[in-house]
Amino acid sequence: MNSDQVYFTEKRSILEHLISNGVQNLKPLIEILLNEAMKIEREEVLKAAPYERNPERTGYANGFKNREYASRMGSLRIQIPQVRGLSFYPRCLEKGERCEKALKLAIAEMYIQGVSTRKVSAITEELCGFEISSTNVSKCATLLDEGLKKFRDRSLTGKYAYVYFDAEYEKIRHDNSVIDMATLIAIGVTEKGKREVLGVSSRLSEAEVHWREFFEELQRRGLSGVRLFISDAHAGMRAARRTVFPSVKWQRCQFHMAQNAQSYAPKESMKIEIGESLRRIFHSCDYAAAQEEKRKCIEKYKVSAPEYVKWLEDNVEEGLTCFSFPEAHRKKIRTVNGLERLNREIRRRTRVATLFPNVASCERLITAVLQGIHEEWITGKRYLDMSLLS
């Protein structure tokens, strides 16, 4: 069969399809048109039709490669022409693949914004005629990896006087079991008084080695000008902080300290009272007043709650570092409440995923959420007036 006969046979097939089905079911027609367009492209590149003897021929046809192709019409069965002797890929598919990539990015963005995989599947089925599994949603999300890695690894320019740290936990699959994985997060306040997300790191625990690597990475990327770290007393963090940033002051979160203090109450009825006694110290007008309030507290509870008094003497100074900084800043540097709100926003998105298949997928979603918040912060209003810091 020569090329003219093939052309008229395919043309007849297209016309018969239109006569039989009208325009209501175009999917088979699109398959025919796309396959024929690719054959025509191959002929143009080879400068010869199938079985044609031509001295200008640049290569040889080498059969076809079957492929499932996602499109707005649904999944199409296409046959990609293969060529021997030169490089060839159909231009019509390149255009389609750009559309396919845009669709995958849209799916990834839906996932990042907290749309469940069930709803994503319903949307793609309605718009495109095919469903998408949770596995495919995760594969689509990997398209974001390059940009997210650049965000995590970017250089930190300028100075950050205040840096907040916290660990956020999500459930992941690991070694045929489900475990809680720690994601370490750092945010800082710039010289202009705006907040930035400085770092994100997911590991299987928040042991000292993870904290130390996290601090060292921030240091390598250029973290400087730090006057104060603010965090809870995370396991492993103290030793790691002393190793990497030994000269930086530390403010232990007062909110968490007040909660911790209640565990030293000798009986249940004293828990609220003990918590309030510590808050009175923290809410003093200055450091001297806080020391006086501490003295009164020790005197009051040395007989009725000796374990609390011992804990207070050993730990309370870690919560009073903020008195070395401007009074107008103290409300926002004495706790990690701002970072806790950030964690709640992360959990609002991660609840959709429920359980992550691995560390990378969890870090990907959390980084994407934080990158969006980071961009809002740097274009939003000032968080602190840094001119007050001498």
Image (spheres, rainbow, N blue to C red):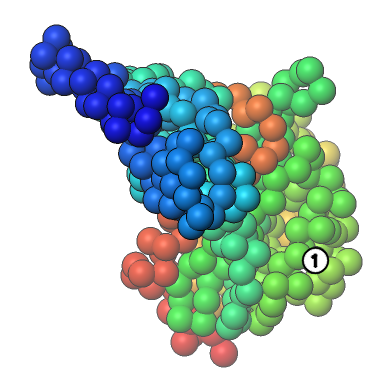
Q: For this rendering, which residue is in front, 104 or 372?
A: 104
Q: Whole-percent x and y of residue 66?
A: 52, 25
Q: Residues within 10 Å of mark 1 (few under 14, many from 20)?
A: some
Quadrant for the N terminus, please. Answer: top left
Q: Position of residue 330 (x, y in %)?
A: 53, 68
For residue 256, say whether it is visible: no
Q: Above or below — where is 195 with respect to 174?
A: below
> Which amino acid does the dot numbered 1 rest on?
Glu
Q: To which residue does mark 1 refer?
A: 216
Q: Residue 84 at what x, y percent from top left?
A: 61, 44
Along the horizontal axis of the image, is 115 left or right of 160? left
Q: Is residue 160 visible?
A: yes
The residue at the point 24 percent across, 18 percent down is: 13
Q: Residue at x 59, y 53 (%)?
A: 86
In this rendering, the answer to whether 92 lies above or below 242 is above
Q: Is residue 19 left or right of residue 44?
A: left
Q: Residue furthest bottom?
A: 390
Instruction: Work out whether 56 lies above or below 179.
Output: below
Which residue is rendered at x = 51% and y = 82% of the image? 191
Question: In front: 122, or 198?
Answer: 122
Q: Is residue 253 above or below residue 329?
A: above
